Amino acid sequence: MVTVLLPGPLRGEAGGASRLTVAATGTLRAVLDELAEPWPRLARRIRDERGELRRYVNVYVDGEDCRHVGGLDTPVGDGAEVQVLPSVAGG
């Protein structure tokens, strides 16, 4: 099982949950694919229409920025923690 942590701005797309659990392991892509089944609106906030991570969304697997490890092919093992953080802009 993998735990996906969601910040406040994304919780509305997941029924208010701050933590989601998915059975998929292997790669970040597999985790996000499984996440998309019950929460398609959440999935659209994380990935674009081509299935790539949105530019303004940062995803960490066990504390490591996935963009520096392997992107969607970042290894995700059983018991891993995936944190999704959309960028916040202001002015």
Image: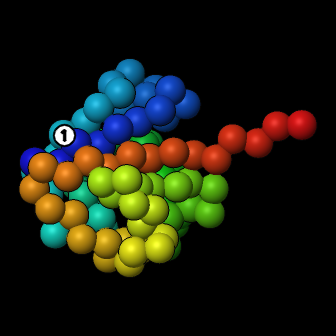
Q: Relative to residue 3, is residue 7 drawn left or right?
A: right
Instruction: Write the residue at 43% across / 29% down.
Output: 11
Instruction: Write the residue at 35% across / 27% down.
Output: 18
x, y percent for residue 78: 10, 56
x, y percent for residue 33: 28, 60
User: In the rendered image, which residue does mark 1 sit on?
Assistant: 21
x, y percent for residue 73: 32, 76
Under mark 1, the amino acid is Thr
Q: Is residue 17 above or below residue 68?
A: above
Q: Relative to residue 72, is residue 30 drawn left or right?
A: left
Instruction: Write the residue at 45% across / 56% down.
Output: 59
Work out whether residue 36 can be spotted: no
x, y percent for residue 50: 49, 73
Q: Relative to residue 71, is residue 82 drawn left or right?
A: left
Kindly state the secondary structure of the residue where label 1 is placed: strand
Work out whether residue 10 can be spotted: yes
Q: Is residue 21 above or below residue 36?
A: above
